[in-house]
């Protein structure tokens, strides 16, 4: 069997988690909804459209970096075990795996959407006879403990600036877990979007075609359908701006007029004033120094830093620091 799947978050569990998240998010101020709920089928399609927008440089810049980097990286590292957090369609992974030159390899995608993972695995397996897939269906913030013991040198992938959705405590918690998946010689490859000119950043989240606005409003459709809510998505204005003090793009949905929303599954009624937006996403932006510091706090050492010529996006390669050794080392006299 070259394909194995473990389901750690079935539809029922996910719905329960969502109910808790929405209750917490809309029941407290500032109102918020977690960005992971953007991605139903329609939301995933809208995001895919975003990645092809002229203003949204992130995906194409990372893809070009990966294409450039893949052969040398795979030759130098020769991984036998690739774990990917938030693998989605595994489009970038495919190019990385292709670059390895055919040795035996186990790929462990971690993603909430079983249908997507199964379809991606089928395609990868058909193209690659030396590949095994051990899929973990779950939330990478909660289910990394189920990643199997390594089958050889390991490469963990966390691409697409997905880490940018997490605030500092959540990033540290996640990176500490990733650190525990790594042994000496293993590596983490993480894609981070870089701090840059505000106009470039804000344009990427305020595209002229309005796709990002539709993507933002879609989260209300997801809550409507999943929890029996009656949000009117068109009554909310898309607002995205760069919060320089926090190094993050913030996306909000601003009610145009006062809204009264009933969420049947939660038996909750929420009144929203135009002055109170729903904060739907943070997209943190990094520098080399902030990336290095974030990694170091989790016991990871920045090994290599790859950026495009315009320094818009970076791929950071990190390895585990030998913390046990450091702890045992005698103090300098
Ligand atoms: C998928 C989290 C990387 O933060 O840029 C795109 C999502 N939101 N446009 C990002 C997103 C609005 C995206 N990530």
Image: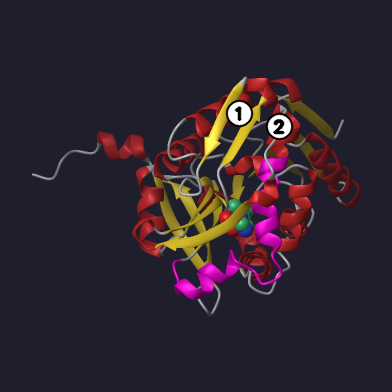
From the top left corner, tell me how far across and down residue 165 is, in percent: 53, 48
Number of numbered discs overlaid on the protein picture: 2
Q: Is residue 113 visible?
A: yes
Residue drawn at the location 67% of the way across and 39% of the way down: 231
Q: Is residue 103 visible?
A: no
Quarter of image, res 37: top right
Residue range in magenta is 195-221
Q: Which residue is mark 1?
A: 143
From the top left corner, tell me how far across and down residue 219 is, in percent: 67, 44
**Considering only order in the chain, which callout, 2 or 1, is on the residue closer to the N terminus?**
2
Residue drawn at the location 45% of the way across and 72% of the way down: 198
Instruction: Examine the rendered structure and indicate whether residue 230 appears above or below residue 289.
Output: above
Outermost residue to the bottom: 309
Which residue is more in the foreground, 34 or 134?
34
Task: Examine the residues drawn in magenta and state their main secondary structure.
Answer: helix
The crowding category of the residue bearing disc 1, from other C-alpha atoms within 10 Å (few below 14, some 14 to 19, many at least 20), is: some
- Does the CB distance between marks 1 and 2 fall below 8 Å? yes
- Element type at marker 2? strand
Q: Would residue 172 be found to the left or right of residue 202 on screen? A: left
Residue drawn at the location 88% of the way across and 43% of the way down: 122
Q: Would residue 162 be found to the left or right of residue 177 on screen? A: right
Q: Which residue is mark 2?
A: 136
Ligand 1 within 8 angstroms of badge 1 C-beta: no
Ligand 1 within 8 angstroms of badge 2 C-beta: no
């Amino acid at each position: 069997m070259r394909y194995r799947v473990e389901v750690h978050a079935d539809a029922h569990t996910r719905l329960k988690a969502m109910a808790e998240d929405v209750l917490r998010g809309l029941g407290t101020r500032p109102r918020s909804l977690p960005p992971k709920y953007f991605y139903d089928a329609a939301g995933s399609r809208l995001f895919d459209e975003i990645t092809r927008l002229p203003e949204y440089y992130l995906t194409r810049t990372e893809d070009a970096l990966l294409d450039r980097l893949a052969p040398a990286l795979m030759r130098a590292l020769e991984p036998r075990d690739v774990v990917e957090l938030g693998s989605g369609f595994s489009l970038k992974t495919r190019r990385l795996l292709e670059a390895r030159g055919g040795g035996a390899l186990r790929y462990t995608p971690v993603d909430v959407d079983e249908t997507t993972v199964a379809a991606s695995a089928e395609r990868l397996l058909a193209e690659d006879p030396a590949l095994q897939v051990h899929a973990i269906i779950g939330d990478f913030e909660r289910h990394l403990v189920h990643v199997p013991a390594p089958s050889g040198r390991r490469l963990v992938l966390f691409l697409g600036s997905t880490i940018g959705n997490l605030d500092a405590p959540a990033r540290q918690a996640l990176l500490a877990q990733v650190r525990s998946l790594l042994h000496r010689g293993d590596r983490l490859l993480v894609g981070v979007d870089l701090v840059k000119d505000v106009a470039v950043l804000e344009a990427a989240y305020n595209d002229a075609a309005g796709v990002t606005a539709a993507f933002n409003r879609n989260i209300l459709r997801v809550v409507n359908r999943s929890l029996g809510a009656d949000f009117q998505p068109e009554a909310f204005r898309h607002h995205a701006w760069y919060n320089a003090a926090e190094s993050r793009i913030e996306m909000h949905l601003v009610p145009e007029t006062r809204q009264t929303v009933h969420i049947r599954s939660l038996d909750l009624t929420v009144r929203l004033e135009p002055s109170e937006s729903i904060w739907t996403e943070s997209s943190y932006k990094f520098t080399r120094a902030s990336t290095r510091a974030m990694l170091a706090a989790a016991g990871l050492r920045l090994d290599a830093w790859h950026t495009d010529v315009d320094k818009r996006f970076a791929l950071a390669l990190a390895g585990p620091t030998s913390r046990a050794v450091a702890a045992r080392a005698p103090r300098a006299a």
